[in-house]
Image: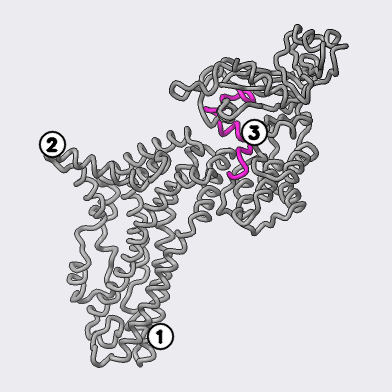
């Protein structure tokens, strides 16, 4: 597999604060990677480093380029949505298309207009006249009309209602993603993107807590719901997290084989949200 | 590169509509003012005896030419003052507003470098806004000459001789264009300073634009008892190298009674070669280059914060 993004010992400090602290990872072509972390974990700083919006220590290569020094070349093959509110509010939709068409060599205006025809966004409307959901549709139409190798999404659906959020991800999967494209996405609404992801990375206090494929996750982590006398036996296997729920105990195990848990209660693969909470609590202990 | 610049400058014009609206508003105000004056003059023509555009009342040819040129210079100066304010506010806003509304994150998601972006804003402030202003002056001039001609014709005067024969349109228009474009180049160190402040200041760019130079000037006075810094800034404001020596009063006085001259020439009073070969012109461009480079450098590290 070829790495689109390769990070080795990447760090970014703001004074005494280590926003990103000596992280190493690879992102391969054709993946949808979820970067998950609590507020202030370093997600946005890491994304900005990948996008060349900030410099950083260590070795970071994106599409074989130094993102900070070769940002113009990089941006020809990367798209990103940083936030739903970043489209300039004064601009008309048609002016925005004119601009991107003039600046971006890989932008297809016809494709963008085709995508926009499926929405209520009109060419002569100004961005400030559009609802938040329509702004996202506009932004996504532009992004999806760019033939980019890597798409970076930083909280792309923040503040949107559930209908727009579902539509956003459905469009992304159905009309954009293929094996030639890679998506890196951060969001707090983990449960909504869980089924889209091929890979996942947890970050906390600037350090990577977990870097795994979703397939491997089920082999590594198991959740057990148990009660009664089995609780003590289960605790003996060293769960990384434990919660009590309606008189039952839910325990999360890291690297414990399924056969060791069988007979102790109900076993299932933990949700990303539960795993995330467990890993964060474990890191903070 | 050129295609990117054109797209970036077009974006500036779309965002900052004051670049067009302000000259258009001045044009309307000037034209309405002239109309009001003509109506007033027509009502009291005999009593007033001399209303600037009641060209029939201006006895001498030289005086008439001076009056029309005075009108042109006077109205142009309104545009130049507006140009000054527009340029200051545009430059201070251009790299600050994009951070304030977070749109910098969108602009930076496009394959346009920070250098291309900052240079497009510099070109807009130093070249495009003055050029638009020049066009505003031309249109205002033309419209008002037509208005005055109609007024003169209705009074039985020969507008062809009294108005169009007394004003050198090409001379005036070329002079207006040179003055406003030269002013953009001459003031380019200030523009670049404002752009630098615009990209650097986290809030209140207008304060950061003006306070440090004032404080620096005061410190120089307190420490060295000299005023070189503030004097240098002040002297850049008067466009001296473009003119041999000129004030509007001197100009009208000199030109009013000149005989044997078909038209009063503003261009004759300019020293274009002296302007572009002046040390101040090139040192200004050097300072502009340094500050623009600093603005580009700072923008590389800027996001929506």
Secondary structure at numbered mark 3: strand
Decide which of B146, A55 is in the foreground and name it: A55
Where is residue B209? Give x, y as percent.
33, 45
How are the residues colored? Answer: one colour
Whichever of callouts 1 and 2 sits on the residue coming sooner in the sequence is 1
Give the number of the disc on residue A250: none
Query: From mark 2 to mark 3, how far is it between C-alphas?
Result: 55 Å
Give the number of the disc on residue B224: 2
Name the residue beneath numbered marker 1.
B150
> Where B9 sits versus A37, above or below?
below
Q: Are marks 3 and 1 on the same chain?
A: no
Badge 3: few (under 14), some or many (20 or more) residues near its Cα, within 10 Å? many
> Where A179 sits versus B275, above or below?
above
Q: Disc 1 vs disc 2: Cβ atoms closer than 8 Å?
A: no
> Where B188 sits versus A151, above or below?
below
Which residues are drawn in magenta? A61-86
Query: From mark 3 to mark 1, how far is it between C-alphas?
Result: 62 Å
Q: Are marks 2 and 3 on the same chain?
A: no
């Amino acid at each position: 597999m070829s790495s689109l993004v390769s990070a080795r010992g990447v760090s970014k400090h703001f004074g005494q604060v280590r926003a990103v602290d000596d992280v190493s990872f690879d992102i391969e072509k054709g993946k949808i990677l979820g970067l998950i972390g609590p507020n202030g974990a370093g997600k946005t700083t890491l994304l900005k480093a990948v996008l060349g919006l900030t410099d950083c220590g260590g070795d970071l290569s994106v599409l074989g380029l130094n993102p900070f020094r070769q940002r113009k070349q990089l941006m020809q093959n990367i798209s990103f949505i940083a936030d739903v509110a970043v489209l300039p509010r004064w601009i008309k939709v048609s002016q925005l298309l004119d601009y991107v068409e003039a600046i971006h060599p890989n932008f297809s205006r016809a494709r963008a207009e085709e995508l926009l025809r499926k929405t209520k966004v009109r060419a002569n409307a100004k961005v400030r006249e559009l609802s938040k959901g329509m702004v996202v549709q506009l932004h996504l139409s532009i992004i999806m009309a760019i033939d980019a190798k890597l798409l970076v999404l930083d909280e792309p659906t923040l503040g949107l209602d559930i209908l727009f959020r579902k539509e956003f991800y459905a469009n992304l999967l159905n009309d954009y993603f293929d094996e030639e494209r890679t998506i890196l996405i951060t969001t707090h609404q983990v449960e909504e993107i869980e089924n889209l992801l091929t890979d996942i990375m947890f970050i906390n206090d600037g350090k990577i807590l977990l870097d795994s494929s979703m397939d491997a996750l089920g082999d590594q982590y198991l959740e057990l719901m148990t009660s009664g006398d089995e609780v003590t036996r289960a605790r003996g296997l060293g769960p990384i997290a434990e919660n009590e729920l309606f008189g039952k105990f839910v325990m999360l195990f890291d690297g414990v084989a399924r056969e060791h848990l069988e007979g102790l209660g109900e076993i299932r693969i933990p949700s990303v949200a539960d795993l995330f909470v467990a890993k964060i609590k474990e890191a903070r202990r | 590169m050129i295609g990117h610049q054109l797209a970036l400058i077009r974006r500036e014009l779309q965002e900052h509509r004051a670049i067009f609206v302000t000259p258009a508003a001045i044009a309307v105000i000037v034209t309405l003012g002239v109309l009001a004056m003509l109506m007033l003059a027509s009502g009291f023509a005999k009593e007033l005896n001399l209303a600037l555009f009641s060209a029939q009342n201006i006895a001498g040819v030289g005086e008439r030419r001076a009056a029309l040129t005075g009108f042109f210079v006077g109205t142009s100066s309104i545009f130049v003052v507006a140009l000054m304010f527009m340029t200051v506010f545009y430059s201070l806003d251009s790299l600050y507003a994009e951070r304030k509304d977070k749109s910098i994150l969108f602009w930076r998601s496009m394959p346009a470098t920070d250098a291309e972006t900052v240079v497009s804003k510099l070109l807009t402030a130093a070249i495009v806004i003055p050029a638009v202003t020049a066009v505003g002056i031309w249109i205002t001039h033309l419209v008002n000459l037509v208005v005055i001609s109609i007024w003169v014709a209705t009074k039985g005067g020969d507008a062809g001789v009294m108005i169009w024969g007394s004003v050198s349109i090409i001379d005036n228009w070329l002079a207006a264009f040179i003055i406003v474009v030269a002013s953009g180049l001459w003031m380019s160190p200030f523009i670049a300073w404002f752009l630098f402040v615009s990209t650097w200041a986290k809030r209140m760019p207008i304060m950061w634009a003006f306070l440090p130079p004032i404080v620096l000037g005061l410190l120089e006075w307190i420490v060295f008892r000299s005023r070189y810094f503030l004097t240098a800034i002040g002297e850049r404001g008067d466009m001296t190298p473009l003119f041999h020596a000129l004030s509007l009063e001197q100009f009208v006085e000199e030109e009013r009674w000149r005989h044997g001259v078909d038209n009063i020439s503003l261009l004759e009073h300019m020293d274009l070669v002296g302007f572009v070969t002046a040390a101040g012109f090139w040192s200004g461009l050097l300072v502009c280059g340094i500050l623009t480079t600093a603005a580009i450098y700072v923008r590389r590290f800027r996001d929506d914060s």
